[in-house]
Image (cartoon, rainbow, N blue to C red):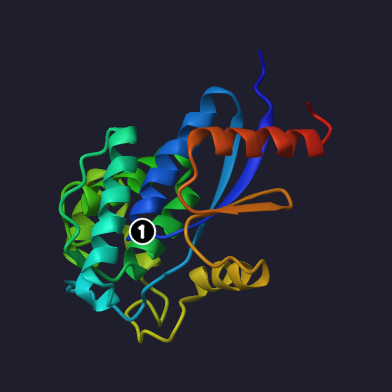
Amino acid sequence: MRKPEVKVSVISDYICPFCFIGHRRLESLREYYDLKINWCFVEIHPETPAEGQSVKMFNYSEAHWDQLMTNLQRLADEEGIKFSPQTTTTNSRKALLLAEASKSLGADKFYPLHNRLFEAFFIDGLNIGDENVLRDIARECDIPGDIIEQAWSDPHSHGPANSVPAPLLTYLQYAGAIQARSVPSYIFGTEMLSGALDRNALHQAAEKYLQNRGEN
């Protein structure tokens, strides 16, 4: 039986743990729908150096950070994800540009890289701000060398922090236009949902999308 097509845009960044969990949960919808996802990459902390930086830069109180990590661990446990200790963050610009460039290769190349970037940072504890680490990941995922070079060919690929490379600018403008305030944000048709949504909420959003299109 043919699965109904559901289109969704997702505003996301590879250094956001809730985006990783959201990616896993969204993938579960493929069992029921022909899911067409537009990954809209937005750099949430362009000020962070590529060599990485302590999460203390966020200036959360110890109590707030502990609560955040407790909630994250609960969500990770639900998805069977073994997070490494979240003590550092990094600059995600080159990882986002690499993923964006790999879209031209099709889903069979994009999704292994997409998933691996999340896993490398959050499970393996690798610094995905490091160009050498990203090259290793790209080769592991059979991304051709010309695509890697194309990914980082924009004049702003290496900074400064207040610049936005052209391949990512459209997504930033889109996020601003729809007033998306956090990542992940999911846009099903005219409805936007944000945050650590459970699978049921995503499923309901997909059903509502189909109802609004008169397909259910």
**Residue 186 locus on image (x, y percent):** 57, 51
Position of 79 relative to 72 (above/below) = above
**Residue projecting furthest to the top:** 1
Quadrant containing the C terminus in the rendered view: top right
Position of 142 relative to 56 (above/below) = above
Q: Secondary structure at mark 1?
A: loop
Q: Amino acid at mark 1?
A: Cys
Question: From the viewer's perspective, is 140 left or right of 110?
Answer: left
Position of 148 relative to 57 (above/below) = above
Quadrant containing the N terminus in the rendered view: top right
**Residue 101 locus on image (x, y percent):** 44, 58
Residue drawn 16% across the image and 48% down it: 124
The quarter holding residue 134 reads bottom left
Question: From the viewer's perspective, is 179 left or right of 208?
Answer: left
Residue drawn 26% across the image and 50% down it: 70
Q: What residue sits right under mark 1 in the picture?
A: 16
Other residues around mark 1 within 10 Å, as few (<14) / some (14–19) / many (≥20): many
Residue drawn 54% across the image and 74% down it: 169
